[in-house]
Amino acid sequence: MKITTLCYIEKNDKYLMLHRTKKKNDINENKWIGVGGHAEGNESPEECLLREVKEETGLTLTSYQFRALITFVCDKADPEMMCLFTADDFTGELSTCDEGELEWVDKAIVPTLPTWEGDAIFLKYLLEDEKSFFTLKLVYEGDKLVEKHLNFY
């Protein structure tokens, strides 16, 4: 099972969102997501998080929290375990991303953006409760969410 990270970076009651518009054959095409990606080699989730955020945004995270472990199962892709983070402090200047457009979006608007059904579920919990850790299993058939299992800790 592949390991990935996803991070929602916060600033002034906004999340930094990535509108995926530039990558060819992108499973996330035209969707709005946080920033992150696949772990390389023997990277820990934290090492992957820091590298991916730097690569995609130019920012260096200085304060972040591990919020959830999300398991994705889909009939069109290999299973994936995603480590979900939020971050509230960073250094550096925002750069151009080769996967899409980066935009600071008001947290109240984020749930209205086009995204995966499962992303809407975990975003809801990130926005409602800034401290709880949870696990979520999402099962897709194509683009359709057919099953979910949620646990809080």
Image (spheres, rainbow, N blue to C red):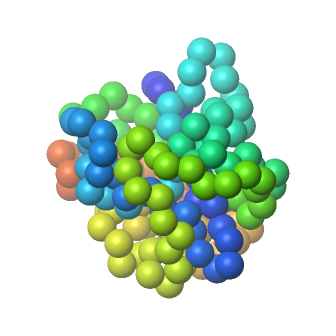
Spot the residue most to the top: 41
Quarter of the image for residue 75 reads top left
Q: Is residue 114 above or below residue 133?
A: below
Q: Is residue 117 above or below residue 3?
A: below
Can the viewer see residue 104 in this picture?
yes
Residue at 40% over, 56% down:
101
Residue at 47% over, 46% down:
97
User: Which part of the image, by quadrant, shows the C terminus?
Assistant: bottom right
Residue at 53% over, 43% down:
56
- The location of residue 38, given as percent across then percent down, is 50, 31
Quarter of the image for residue 16 reads bottom right
Q: In front here: 65 or 132?
A: 65
Q: In front here: 75 or 107?
A: 107
- The location of residue 113, given as percent across then percent down, is 35, 72
Q: In front here: 88 or 5?
A: 88
- The location of residue 117, given as percent across then percent down, is 32, 62
Give the tally of numbered discs: 0
- Left/right placement of residue 79 relative to residue 52 reads left
Can the viewer see residue 49 in this picture?
no
- The location of residue 77, given as percent across then percent down, is 28, 32
Residue at 59% over, 59% down:
8
Quarter of the image for residue 18 reads bottom left
- Left/right placement of residue 86 relative to residue 91 reads left
Q: Is residue 82 above or below residue 68?
A: above
Spot the residue most to the bottom: 108
- Left/right placement of residue 64 relative to residue 48 reads right
